[in-house]
Image: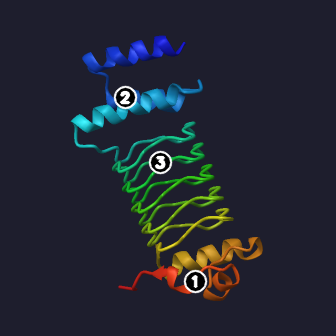
Amino acid sequence: MFQRLRHRLAMMRYRFVPTVRLIQGIADGGKPGASHILIEALRERLAHQDGSLEGSDFSGASLDGALLAACRLAGARFAGAALRGAYFGYADLSYADFTGADLRDANFREAQLTGADFTGADLRGANFARARLKEAKLSEADLRGANFWGAELDWDTLQAVGKANADRGAATSQAAKQRAGIPARELHLAAED
């Protein structure tokens, strides 16, 4: 099965396949491993183009463990997608839609997440170290075990985290962070404009 898919991938290198069709193949993948092969084809194409997947629709796609580091995905839609363990380090995900997505153990290290919508997303164990989360929507998201070390948060985002996770024991206030053993200096709040 994979040999046939790899052969089709090799043939795509020599003839034009619209990027939209590659993305649709990822969303419709269904077969284990198929999505990752199509993502590699997409990444290779982007390396020869402008590297942008801005506004792409990955809603409902099964992309567990996907490597989308340093990609330009501003405004992309991942609503309801399975992205468990995905790596988005250094990616531009400004105003991306992750509503209801499974992002357990996902890595957003130093990602640009300004205005991203994580409403109702499962973010247990996600890494947001040094990520920019100004204006991000985190209401009703499950943030148990999420790492926000050095993350840039504004007050509205911080309050949403506190409200959504008050009964889940999330460390959002300085006092709660100290009880959890996280030094208060590791929480960086974006200056209000």
Which of 188 and 28 lies nearest the eye of the viewer?
188
In the image, residue 68 sits, relative to residue 39, either above or below, namely below
Q: Is residue 46 above or below residue 13?
A: below
Instruction: Identify residue type, mark 1.
Output: Pro
Q: Is residue 165 left or right of residue 2?
A: right
Give the distance between the C-alpha atoms of the residues marked 3 and 2, in whole angstroms. Answer: 20 Å
SS category of the residue bearing label 3? loop
Nearer to us of marks 1 and 3 is 1
Q: Which residue is mark 1?
A: 183
Q: State whether residue 129 is above or below residue 40.
A: below
Mark 3 belongs to which amino acid? Arg
For the question of whether residue 44 can be seen, the reply is yes
Residue 136, given in percent of the width and then of the height, sits at: 49, 68
Q: Give the image quarter of residue 52.
A: top left
Look at the numbered discs 1 and 3 and tell me whether their residues touch, using CB distance below 8 Å.
no
Q: Secondary structure at mark 1?
A: loop
Q: Give the spatial CA distance, label 2 vs label 1.
A: 43 Å
Residue located beneath label 3 in the image = 77
Query: Image quadrant of residue 182?
Result: bottom right
Q: Position of residue 155 (x, y in %)?
A: 51, 82
Q: Earlier in the sequence, mark 3 or mark 2?
A: 2
**Picture quarter with the N terminus:** top right
Name the spot of residue 41 as percent of width and height, x first: 37, 28
Depth check: 173 or 19 in front? Answer: 173
Q: Residues within 10 Å of mark 1 (few under 14, many from 20)?
A: few
Residue in the picture at 51% in, 60% down = 117
Residue type at tag 2: Ala
> Sequence order check: which comes first, mark 1 or mark 3?
3
Q: Looking at this view, is 181 or 164 the one in front?
A: 181
Mark 3 or mark 2: which is in front?
Answer: 2
Say which mark, if any, is on residue 41: 2
